[in-house]
Image: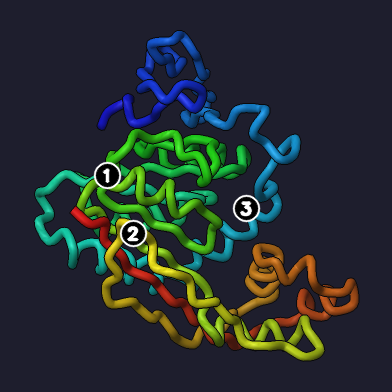
Amino acid sequence: MTSGVWRCPLCHEPLSLVGRSFVCSNRHSFDQAKEGYVNLLPVNRKHSADPGDNKEMLESRRYFLQQGFYAPLAEALAVAIREYFPDSAEALDVLDAGCGEGYYLSQLAQHLGDNTQFIGTDISRAAMRLAAKQYPAMQFAVASSFDLPLADASVDVLVRVFAPASEAEIVRVLKPGGLYLWAYPAAQHLFELRRLIYDDPKPHTVEDLPPIVGMRECTPLQVRYAVSLPDQASVAALLKMTPYYWSASAEKQAHCQRLQTLDLTVDFAVSVMKKVS
């Protein structure tokens, strides 16, 4: 896959990069932003004027993630990919659907090397602007995970960290034998922070979902460890990047943001599936 990684969101024909525009055979054209990403989210498919995470949330997330607090999750994803695709000389196409500012793709790049093409989509234009500017060798597009602008059977690995997505779209874009990794909060994830926000906090629950047609479940992963946030800025950044920020009263927000340190349980579950050949 070269510049033809994307397909047209209007007619589903392949897009080619011509100058600074992505163009399909039906002459639909999408300009490449100066940062390098392309906006493939049609206006009539937006649920708001500027959907997705805003710049403040994304910058908080980038500050928090780049300190390595969630690096064990990124490493676990990379190890799983290499386990299922052990030949480091094999060319792979890896998609992060709902990639935010690109942290997990950047970490996977460090582990998986030069023969992998990294592709990121997110509904937030601010996220794609940050990601494309920071990681110019990767391909990024503003797009919905419920209507991915990629061809059928075009990616080897699809990674999804927290983000909502369409199972049908995941199956569609994966190649036969392709790998799907879905990371989500397990029971004790950030429970200490939840106790500061809610009067009666409950562990995370993830309902048992029916099997995905066309996918075979493999052994899931659990990534669980303790971490200590060392300063006020890290605590404030974590709060702002989570949904808890909007759940907290002004008083509890202020209390959390005054904390100088915070000891936390990080607890991720990762579903691992392969597309049936």
Q: Amino acid at mark 3?
A: Leu
Q: Residues within 10 Å of mark 1 (few under 14, many from 20)?
A: many
Task: Describe the element under mark 1 as helix, strand or loop.
Answer: strand
Place of residue 239 in the rendered image (x, y in percent of width and height, measured from the top left): 70, 70
User: Would you identify the image quadrant in which residue 16 lies?
Assistant: top left
Residue occupying the point 32% across, 25% down:
4
Q: Secondary structure at mark 2?
A: strand
SS of the residue under disc 3: helix
Q: Nearer the viewer, residue 51 or 113?
A: 51
Residue 8 image offset from top left, x and y in percent? 45, 24
The residue pinned by badge 1 equals 93
Which numbered disc, 1 or 3, marks the residue that appears first in the sequence? 3
Query: Is disc 2 surrounded by few (<14), some (14 to 19) or many (20+) residues within 10 Å?
Result: many
Res 241 quadrant in image: bottom right
Q: Position of residue 6 (x, y in %)?
A: 39, 29
Is there CB contact under 8 Å for labels 1 and 3? no
185 vs 146: above or below:
below
Q: Tell me which amino acid carries mark 2.
A: Tyr
Q: Which mark is residue 58?
A: 3
Three-letter residue code for mark 1? Asp
What is the distance, in whole Å, between disc 1 and disc 3 at their CAs? 25 Å
Q: Nearer the viewer, mark 1 or mark 3?
A: 1
* Residue that appears at 35% across and 53% down: 158
Counting other residues with Cα less than 10 Å from the Cα at mark 3, is it few (<14), some (14-19), or many (20 or more)?
many
Q: Residue at x 44, y 69 (%)?
A: 210
Q: Is residue 99 visible?
A: no
Mark sitting earlier along the chain (3/2): 3
Residue 265 seen in the figure: yes
Q: Is residue 19 left or right of residue 142?
A: left
Query: Residue 7 appears at what percent x and percent y?
Result: 40, 27
* Disc on res. 180: 2
Rendered-image quadrant of the N terminus: top left
